[in-house]
Structures are given as structure tokens and as C-alpha cells.
Amino acid sequence: MTRTLIVDGNSLLNTGFHGIKNMYNGEDHIGGLYHFLNTLRKLIDEYLITKIVVFWDGENNTEPRKKLYPEYKLNRKKKSRSIEDIESYSKQKLRTQEYLEELYVRQATFKFCEADDCISYYCEKAIEEEKIVLTSDRDLLQLISPTTSLHVISLNQLLTTFQS
């Protein structure tokens, strides 16, 4: 059976970008990029992964939900980010996507879709695969089933149906 690691790309990149502030290559901050690739490397070995699929938040990804429910994500704190941070994050995201392409890692982004929606859909449809979802989004706990586990980034822990 194929063992697939399904990655919430923005979630993993954000964790490294904000968590590893002091990693540079010359003038360029590379904390997000380093954390992303290093985490994949570790999990491939740890879980004997045979396939990786990375989903990224699409353009205007919250727009459909905000039309249905204007208060969607209204309680979230807006982080003020400098122009330098925005540019650095974008550069690291692009570089990460390029590296993943070179490594033949499947990636997908859909306009008006959040990565967690794509992950949920994939888990529902890929019934022949054993899936491990890598994310910080605890809303995805509802996906846990006999064929789907959740590795929560912030806990660095695998959650399965077999836990008490």
C-alpha cells in the first residue's frame, strides 16, 4: 500500500519562517525553506513515506467562505509584517516550490481554495492509500480514520485512531 505524506504547505513554511529567525544564506533568510525540506526529510525516514503531496493555499482562498459567512476568520489576530518579511516569505515559498518540483514532489494550488479543503478532498478520494497529514490546523483532526493519521506540527506528534 502506498504511504502518502500530505502536507499543508503554507502551515509548514510558516512554522519555519517564524520559528527559525537566525538562519541565513548570505543576506537571505532561509529559515522557512530549511525547516520545510528538513521536516520532509525526517518524516520520509520516520514514516517510510513512498509519496508526497503538498497543497498550498490558493489565490483569494477565503473569499468563498467570507461570502457565505462574513465573520469567517474575523477573530484572527492580524500580524503586522514588514515589506522585507513579505518579500522574504514569498521568495522562500517560491524556492521551496522549485526544490519540490526538482524532487518530483506533487504540488497543487487552486484558486479560491484553502490547503485544508484540498487535503480533506484528497483524503476522501484516495481510499487505497495510507495517508499521514502534516499540518498545524487542528480542524483536520476530523480526518483521522483507519487509513488517515495526522502529524501535528506544533506537537511533533502523530495522532491516529488507535490513541486513547
Image (cartoon, helix red, strand yellow):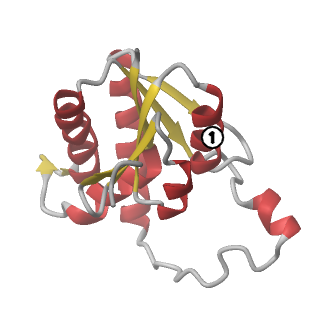
The kind of secondary structure element at disc 1 is helix
Q: Is residue 100 visible?
A: yes
How many numbered tags mark residues here?
Answer: 1
Identify which residue is drawn at 65% across, 28% down. 125
**Residue denoted by label 1:** 118
Identify which residue is drawn at 39% across, 15% down. 104
Name the one closer to the observer, 34 or 74.
74
The reply, left or right, for residue 121 in relation to residue 52 is right
Q: Residues within 10 Å of mark 1 (few under 14, many from 20)?
A: many
The quadrant in which the N terminus is found is: top left
Residue 40 at what x, y percent from top left?
Answer: 26, 35
As drawn, 41 above or below 150: above
Residue 116 at what x, y percent from top left?
Answer: 58, 49
As drawn, 130 above or below 152: above
* Amino acid on which the number 1 mark rests in the picture: Cys
The reply, left or right, for residue 24 in relation to residue 63 is left
Residue 82 at what x, y percent from top left?
Answer: 41, 72
The quadrant in which the C terminus is found is: bottom left
As drawn, 47 above or below 154: above
The reply, left or right, for residue 100 in relation to residue 60 is left
Residue 137 at what x, y percent from top left?
Answer: 47, 60
The reply, left or right, for residue 157 in relation to residue 68 is left
Which corner quadrant of the image does residue 58 belong to? top right
Q: Is residue 109 visible?
A: no
Name the one closer to the observer, 18 or 12.
12
Identify which residue is drawn at 50% across, 28% down. 107
Identify which residue is drawn at 54% across, 62% down. 139
Farthest right residue?
68
Name the one closer to the observer, 51 or 30.
51
